[in-house]
Image (spheres, grey):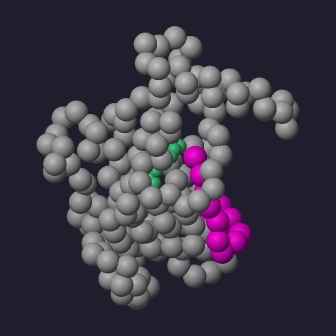
Amino acid sequence: MVLSTANARYYGLAETGWRGSHGTLDDSSDTGAGAGALGGTPIVMLGDGTYMMMNSDIYSTVLSGHKMIVVVCDNGGYAVISRLQQFKGVPGFNNLLKDCRIQNADNPLHVDFAAHAAAMGAAARKCESLADLADALEWARGNDRTTVLSIVTDACSWVPGDADWDVGVPEVSDRESVAKARAHQEEIRARQRVGV
Ligand SMILES: Cc1ncc(C[n+]2csc(CCOP(=O)(O)OP(=O)(O)O)c2C)c(N)n1
Ligand SMILES: [Mg+2]
């Protein structure tokens, strides 16, 4: 099982020989997911935003016959980045679909991931519940090619535990919330250990 976030390649490491059965790949420097080098079908779990950034790997695995199972957690956008954005003192914009400008806010323009994956030759199914996902995984295991399962997830529930994320905040702003975020950033930086 591989958890993959933004821009990690879904399958790459299967071909480069990444060894291990579980892993989490995070952020833009990663170039591998979809382990399975030691046998078995890789299961790659990723977000809807990650799907949008790197879905051509699905087509490649259909063409090359390197089957994988992809579970797309569709929470309506870049949820973690929306959270980060709001922590830095501004209301969310352009990260969650519901916060985007060109659309009906009550009915955001969701991508139909199952239809999209099917268009690239993958087997695909939309799951309506966790029980449905369990059935779909069984079905996916028996398929002869890459299979994509999508399921709706929550954009605002987070597991416990957190860390400061040192992203630049403007020094000058009319918003008090931004000034506070900036002051917090300076506190974070004062506690950083250079070179560690
Ligand atoms: C190419 C690239 N652009 C931007 C980012 C920053 N980034 C990290 S997580 C993330 C959001 C990913 O969205 P999604 O996969 O839907 O996960 P969610 O946060 O919604 O669970 C982005 C844009 C990145 N890692 N790589
Ligand atoms: Mg998302």
Quadrant in which the C terminus appears: top right
With respect to residue 160, does 82 lie above or below?
Answer: above
Closer to the camera in the image, 179 or 110: 179
Magenta residues, start to end: 14-27
| Any part of residue 169 in sight | no
Q: Is residue 195 visible?
A: yes
The image shows residue 49 at horizontal and vertical percentages of 40, 50
Residue at x 46% of width, y 35% of height: 85
Q: Position of residue 123 (x, y in %)?
A: 31, 74
Using the rendered view, name the quadrant where residue 25 is placed.
Answer: bottom right
Tell me residue 21's x, y (percent). Answer: 66, 75
Q: Which residue is drawn at the image coordinates 43% and 13% (left, top)?
A: 174
Question: Is 82 rendered above or below residue 42?
Answer: above
In the image shown, does 153 or 50 lie closer to the viewer?
153
Query: Looking at the picture, does residue 186 appear above or below residue 97?
Result: above
Q: Which quarter of the rendered picture does the N terminus lie within? A: bottom right
The quadrant in which residue 60 appears is bottom left
**Residue 85 in magenta stretch:** no
Left or right: 190 as drawn, with respect to 85: right
Looking at the image, which residue is at 16% across and 40% down?
103
